[in-house]
């Protein structure tokens, strides 16, 4: 799967309106309702210390990269049945690509 190139500036706006209420991405930040996203790319699902993941997330064994995030963000419940993230997803491919472009910069 090829992920379309995204616009990080647009992705930042998506993060602020759709993700920031549950996630942070700064290294010093703690977990909120969702885990801290710092170091997201290359990390295995369910592996942030101190966060209470669902058994589905802990056992999924997904390595987060552009492709896996692109699929996950479309419909998290379909991608990983049984996960507890209360987010319906981003059905538009451009929105997902933009968010991923932002996350690649912000979580590094």
Image: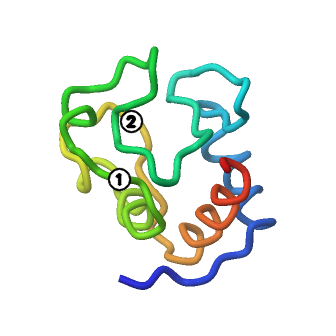
Q: Which mark is residue 63?
A: 1
Q: Residue at x 44, y 55 (%)?
A: 89
**Image: 59 above or below 64:** above
**Image: 62 above or below 65:** above
Say what secondary structure mark 1 lies in: loop
Residue under label 2, please give it: 85
Q: Residue at x 73, y 34 (%)?
A: 26
Q: Please state which of residues 23 and 42 is positioned toward the viewer in this rendering.
A: 42
Image location of residue 68, percent across then percent down: 37, 63
- Please name the colour scheme applied to the rendered image: rainbow
Q: Residue at x 58, y 21 (%)?
A: 32
Image location of residue 11, percent across then percent down: 70, 62
Q: Earlier in the sequence, mark 2 or mark 1?
A: 1
Q: Residue at x 41, y 36 (%)?
A: 86
**Image: 30 above or below 34:** above
Foreground tag (2 vs 1): 1
Say what secondary structure mark 2 lies in: loop
**Image: 34 above or below 74:** above
């Amino acid at each position: 799967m090829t992920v379309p190139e995204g616009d990080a500036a647009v992705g930042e706006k998506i993060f602020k309106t759709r993700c920031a209420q549950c996630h942070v991405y700064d290294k010093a930040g703690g977990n909120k309702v969702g885990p801290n996203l710092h170091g997201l790319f290359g990390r295995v699902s369910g592996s942030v210390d101190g966060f209470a993941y669902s058994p589905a997330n802990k056992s999924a064994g997904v390595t987060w990269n552009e492709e896996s995030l692109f699929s996950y963000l479309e419909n998290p419940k379909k991608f990983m049945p049984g996960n507890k993230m209360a987010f319906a997803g981003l059905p538009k491919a451009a929105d997902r690509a933009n968010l991923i472009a932002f996350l690649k910069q912000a979580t590094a």
